[in-house]
Image (spheres, helix red, strand yellow):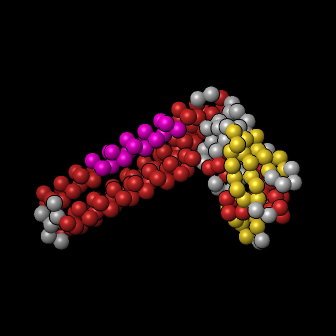
Amino acid sequence: MNEEVQFYIDEAQEGMDKAIHHLQVELAKIRAGKASTAMLDGIKAEYYGALTPLNQIASVNTPDARTLVIQPWEKAALNAIEKAIINSNLGLNPSNDGTMIRINVPPLTEERRRELVKRTKGEGETAKVSVRNIRRDANEAIKKLQKDGVPEDMVKDGEAKVQQITDKYIAKVDEVLAVKEKEIMTV
């Protein structure tokens, strides 16, 4: 296969890997009944006048499956962290004891589980769209090579290879979603 065609195939695969990784990062933020430090990844607290991610101003731990403990490096950050968690719309009630913040993660209701599954599927659809866009871009780049003198059969082979890779990554998205859905629906 032509080196230029192979370059675009490799580039497409790399982009699709990133789409899957992004999906996994986003799904980690969706809680599945168990306490997870990833639940707080998107939260930023006001710290010396700047919005700062929680993990940069405090240690976040899960001593058990239903509890999150946030221990700020400085006590002055406690109230800002508590306020950020309350304003995050995660439905968590932080309890501030003056040295650390404890969050008891309530068990999910059936309705809430269904909402989370819907959100999970939305993230999956976004990942699939990303994968398809990468396929389109790769195919367009490969077709342009034909105008530059690359034989038509090599272009067709390249497009077929990109389609194989796309199918593999779409299946991978479905796999990741199925695992997360099962995790959410398990009581």
Residue 86 shown left or right of residue 31 in the figure: right
Could you say where residue 30 lies in the image, as x and y percent from the top left? 61, 44
Which residue is found at the position 18% from the left and 69% from the top?
147
Residue lying furthest right in this view? 98
Q: Nearer the viewer, residue 39 or 146?
A: 39
Which residue is found at the position 55% from the left and 42% from the top?
120
In the figure, 56 relative to 70: above or below?
A: below
- Asked if residue 176 is among those painted magenta in the image, a careful observer would answer yes
Q: Nearer the viewer, residue 144 or 90?
A: 90
| Residue 82 visible (yes or no) | yes
Point out the stretch of residues depicted in magenta. 164-180
| Residue 115 visible (yes or no) | no
Which residue is found at the position 58% from the left and 29% from the top?
186
Which residue is found at the position 32% from the left and 45% from the top?
167
Quarter of the figure with the N terminus = bottom left
Q: Quadrant of residue 18?
A: bottom left
- Asked if residue 53 is among those painted magenta in the image, a careful observer would answer no
Numbered marks: total: 0
Quarter of the figure with the C terminus = top right
Could you say where residue 162 lies in the image, as x and y percent from the top left? 27, 53
Residue 128 shown left or right of residue 38 in the figure: left
Q: Nearer the viewer, residue 98 or 115?
A: 98
Could you say where residue 104 lies in the image, as x and y percent from the top left? 76, 40
Main SS type for the magenta part?
helix
Residue 185 shown left or right of residue 88 in the figure: left
Could you say where residue 99 lies in the image, as x and y percent from the top left? 84, 54
Residue lying furthest front in this view? 63
